[in-house]
Image (spheres, rainbow, N blue to C red):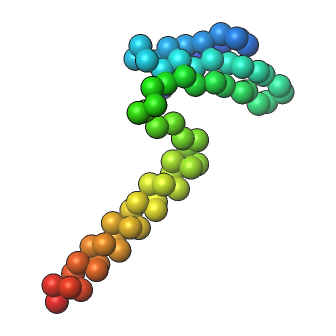
Amino acid sequence: MLALSRKKDESLVIDNCIEVTILDIRGDQVKIGISAPKEIPIYRKEVYLQIQEANKQAMDTSAADALKKIM
């Protein structure tokens, strides 16, 4: 993991196409802005993990249904 220090209104660039800007800092919260191409999905980690779990369950269900049809 790369750890960087940034101040309000400072940015960092990832892979020449994603810009992350520090918009506001209040106490222990940091508000960030992300500029990226539309084809790059951006999720909060907790939402990303929920999507991954739902996809896994859907795959497990699909596999089970396929096995039932074969038998």
Q: Residue at x 43, y 18 (%)?
A: 17
Q: Residue at x 45, y 26 (%)?
A: 37
Q: Residue furthest bottom?
A: 71
Tell me if I can see residue 55 in this picture: yes
Give percent across and percent down for residue 49. Answer: 51, 51
Q: Which picture quadrant has residue 62?
A: bottom left
Q: Is residue 15 left or right of residue 48?
A: left
Tell me if I can see residue 3 in this picture: no
Q: Residue at x 76, y 21 (%)?
A: 24
Q: Which picture quadrant has residue 14?
A: top left
Q: Relative to residue 13, is residue 35 depicted above or below?
A: below
Q: Relative to residue 8, is residue 42 depicted above or below?
A: below
Give percent across and percent down for residue 40. Answer: 43, 33
Nearest the camera: 15 or 35?
35
Nearest the camera: 21 or 40?
40
Give percent across and percent down for residue 48. Answer: 51, 48
